[in-house]
Image: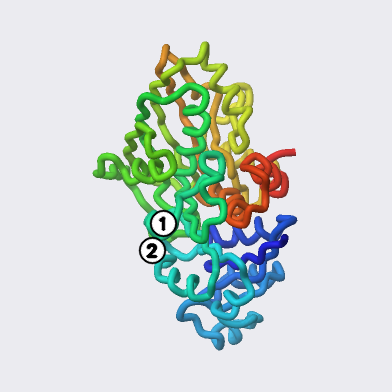
């Protein structure tokens, strides 16, 4: 079976998801939608992706810009089995009735409230929960990072308590309207919204999150303190557990990766598309164990970390893989996340 996939919204997430869909052996990209001409709309046509006009966009504006347009988003929906909604936060909900009337399955992003979908999703954590569903929500970049780590720690050691401080980037690199920002901005919400979001995946996860916004565009960093129920013998055991799990990258001490600038330089050096880092990033020197208390840093690339989750969500919804491991293996191979 080949699933026909359309992507509504071709910005930071949408263009990455579209590229990922185009690489899958069991999926076909039938089109992407933009509301106005832009360099990203040009990218879609350069890549040979059928470009459709979404929302209140005007066909004549695209044609005046010299962009070849295949039609309207409504016409794109007619050719698809599933829509990946990558529209701006809260816009996806406005499309929900349209997707349903077109008898389309739909995947939403973490900027939408959980009740837009039947289930919130992260492949390592709850792949089977999305099997056969019509509406799935891939949780946000930070929540994806948390629940991936939780999937490892809960299964191996159990978690009695988890406190996490999220040091958040102020904006994506292209979001110039949000900057420059010269300041450190505490988020006065206790816990931050990431706690209930993570608990849409693991309802019993005893986590409390707080967040601080800092003036960078590169990545997020999480500072984690986890009280483990069954403490491992050493920090090396925890590091090994992360290294053995797909979608984690632990840098060796000798690699001298000091922080997020070097992480993205590593991605550039390895010719990752757009210098993306779709894995949770940890450091050997940033994992410490004191009895049952585990402390670790992890970095999250907000532009790309949810991309493989969108692909796995499609497979789960259409029952294209035997289990999570099988889907993750195909996704990661096609996206260059494993050899």
The quarter in which the N terminus is drawn is bottom right
Q: Is residue 300 rendered to the left or right of residue 24?
A: left
Decide which of 43, 335 is in the foreground and name it.
335
Q: Position of residue 70 (x, y in %)?
A: 64, 81
Name the residue tied to disc 1. 111
The quarter in which the C terminus is drawn is top right
Name the residue tied to disc 2. 90
Q: Is residue 259 rendered to the left or right of residue 227?
A: right
Q: Position of residue 47 (x, y in %)?
A: 70, 67
Total marks drawn? 2
- Helix or strand or loop: what does disc 1 sit on? loop
Q: Is residue 191 above or below residue 176?
A: above
Q: Is residue 301 above or below residue 114?
A: above
Measured Cα–Cα span from mark 1 to mark 2: 6 Å
Q: Is residue 233 rendered to the left or right of residue 94?
A: right
The residue at the point 38 percent across, 46 percent down is: 197
Q: Quadrant of residue 16?
A: bottom right
How many other residues sit within 10 Å of disc 2, few (<14), some (14-19) or many (≥20)? some
Q: Position of residue 94 (x, y in %)?
A: 40, 70
Q: Are marks 1 and 2 in contact (CB under 8 Å)?
A: yes
């Amino acid at each position: 079976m080949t699933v026909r996939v359309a992507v509504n919204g071709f910005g930071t997430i949408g263009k990455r998801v579209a590229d990922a869909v185009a690489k899958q052996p069991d999926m076909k990209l039938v089109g992407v939608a933009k509301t106005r001409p832009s360099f990203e709309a040009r990218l879609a046509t350069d890549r040979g992706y059928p470009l459709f006009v979404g929302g209140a966009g005007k066909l004549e504006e695209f044609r005046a810009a010299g962009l070849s347009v295949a039609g309207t988003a409504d016409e794109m929906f007619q050719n698809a089995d599933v829509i990946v909604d990558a529209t701006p936060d809260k816009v996806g909900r406005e499309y929900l009735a349209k997707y349903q009337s077109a008898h389309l399955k739909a995947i939403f992003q973490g900027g939408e409230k959980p009740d837009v979908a039947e289930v919130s999703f992260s492949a390592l954590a709850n792949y089977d929960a999305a099997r056969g569903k019509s509406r799935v929500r891939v949780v946000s970049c930070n929540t994806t990072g948390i629940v991936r780590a939780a999937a490892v720690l809960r299964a191996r050691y159990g978690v009695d308590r988890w406190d996490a401080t999220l040091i958040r980037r102020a904006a994506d690199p292209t979001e110039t309207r949000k900057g420059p920002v010269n300041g450190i901005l505490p988020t006065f919400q206790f816990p931050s919204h990431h706690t209930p979001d993570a608990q849409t995946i693991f309802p019993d996860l005893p986590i409390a999150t707080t967040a601080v916004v800092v003036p960078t565009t590169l990545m997020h960093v999480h500072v984690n303190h986890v009280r483990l129920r069954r403490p491992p013998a050493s920090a090396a055991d925890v590091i090994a557990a992360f290294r053995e799990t797909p979608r984690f990258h632990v840098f060796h001490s000798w690699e001298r990766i000091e922080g997020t600038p070097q992480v993205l330089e590593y991605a550039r050096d390895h010719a990752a598309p757009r210098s993306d880092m779709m894995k949770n990033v940890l450091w050997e020197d940033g994992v410490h164990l004191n009895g049952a208390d585990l402390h670790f840093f992890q970095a999250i690339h907000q532009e790309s970390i949810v991309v493989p989750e969108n692909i796995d969500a499609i497979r789960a919804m259409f029952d294209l893989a035997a289990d999570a491991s099988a889907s993750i293996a195909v996704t990661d191979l096609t996206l260059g996340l494993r050899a």
